[in-house]
């Protein structure tokens, strides 16, 4: 199999490349940057599949970013897919996000996501959703489309919100009693799912996650244990935070956002190889340099 991974500095793209080189050494992998127009002259017929992960990686509510989100996350995605289809690539895998469903729940609200209802709250989410819809219209028997609506992806040396959480754990000696539940996905579980999708040439929409939800407070406590720091739970802090339960930043940290676990069992793919506890240990050890 000949695989093109879009983007050269993507955490997910590079992790997949390393994973496949170990588990599927016969797969020929190419990384290409799509920051210039040079890709338009490239011959996509050389590839059997494209894993499209290039894009604006993280959400922002700044209106200044809106045009860029649509230009990159929607328009560039569609242009690459249309070229792939014209040049007889068999399979296009698009990295989307569960952000298309809604924002994080307000504090204290643990309801599950309804994957049949999309409610994008900003341009980042809307651009991903619109790209999905156009891609599905391009699909036919000879051009398979797979869409991965991922929750927060984390692992050793990951980027985004998870390392930010580990960073602030250094200072959070006193914690609120808030029991939230978040769908998360360990990087090697994502890699294994993509490996199986590629090998089976299976199309579809996927909502992968680890088998157990993540609780923010548990992560902070575990991180502080690795730092050999004491942690204290204070009931009044939880009650105080609930006064600001609609605050955007607090919702990102302490709000719930979860897909029903049963909706993540895809085509009998056995991709959830690493437990949440092991995944957290691996990630926290790498972040704090613990052997």
Image (cartoon, rainbow, N blue to C red):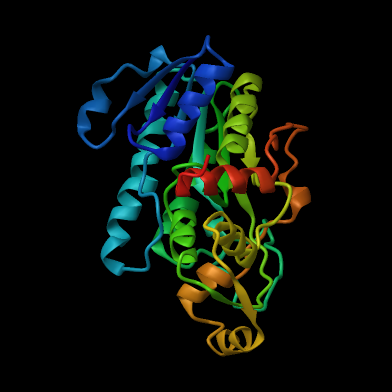
Image-based side of 83 in relation to 245, left or right: left
In the rendered image, is residue 133 in sight?
A: no
Q: Position of residue 183 (x, y in %)?
A: 64, 55
Q: Position of residue 38 (x, y in %)?
A: 21, 27
Q: Nearer the viewer, residue 164 or 47?
A: 164
Residue at 37% from the left image edge and 27% from the top image edge: 83
Q: Nearer the viewer, residue 139 or 154?
A: 154
Residue 259 to residue 18: above or below: below
Image-based side of 271 in relation to 66, left or right: right
Residue at 41% from the left image edge and 27% from the top image edge: 5
Q: Nearer the viewer, residue 15 or 112?
A: 15
Q: Nearer the viewer, residue 217 or 41?
A: 217
Residue 217 to residue 166: above or below: below
Residue at 34% from the left image edge and 41% from the top image edge: 76
Q: Position of residue 84 (x, y in %)?
A: 41, 25
Image-based side of 227 in relation to 60, left or right: right
Q: Position of residue 109 (x, y in %)?
A: 67, 76
């Amino acid at each position: 199999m000949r695989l093109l991974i879009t983007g050269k500095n993507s955490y997910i793209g590079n992790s997949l490349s390393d994973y496949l080189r170990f588990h599927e050494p016969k797969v020929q992998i190419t990384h290409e940057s799509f920051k210039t127009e040079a890709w338009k002259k490239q011959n996509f017929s050389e590839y059997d599949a494209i894993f499209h992960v290039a894009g604006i990686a993280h959400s922002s509510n700044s209106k200044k970013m809106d045009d860029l989100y649509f230009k990159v996350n929607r328009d560039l995605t569609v242009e690459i897919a249309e070229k792939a289809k014209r040049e007889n690539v068999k399979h296009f895998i698009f990295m989307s996000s569960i952000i298309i469903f809604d924002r994080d729940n307000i504090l204290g609200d643990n309801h599950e996501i309804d994957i049949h209802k999309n409610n994008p709250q900003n341009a980042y989410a809307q651009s991903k959703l619109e790209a999905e819809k156009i891609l599905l219209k391009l699909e036919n028997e000879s051009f398979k489309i797979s869409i991965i609506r991922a929750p927060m992806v984390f692992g050793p040396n990951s980027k985004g919100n998870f390392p930010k959480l580990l960073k602030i754990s250094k200072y959070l000696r006193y914690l609120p009693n808030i029991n939230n539940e978040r769908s998360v996905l360990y990087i090697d579980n994502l890699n294994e799912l993509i490996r199986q999708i590629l090998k089976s040439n299976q199309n579809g929409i996927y909502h992968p996650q680890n088998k157990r939800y993540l609780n923010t407070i548990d992560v902070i406590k575990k991180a502080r244990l690795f730092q050999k720091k004491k942690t204290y739970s204070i009931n009044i802090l939880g009650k105080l935070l609930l006064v600001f339960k609609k605050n955007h930043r607090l919702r990102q940290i302490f709000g719930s956002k979860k897909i029903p676990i049963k909706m993540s069992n895809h085509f009998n793919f056995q991709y959830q190889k690493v437990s949440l506890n092991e995944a957290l240990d691996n990630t926290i050890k790498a972040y704090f340099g613990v052997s």
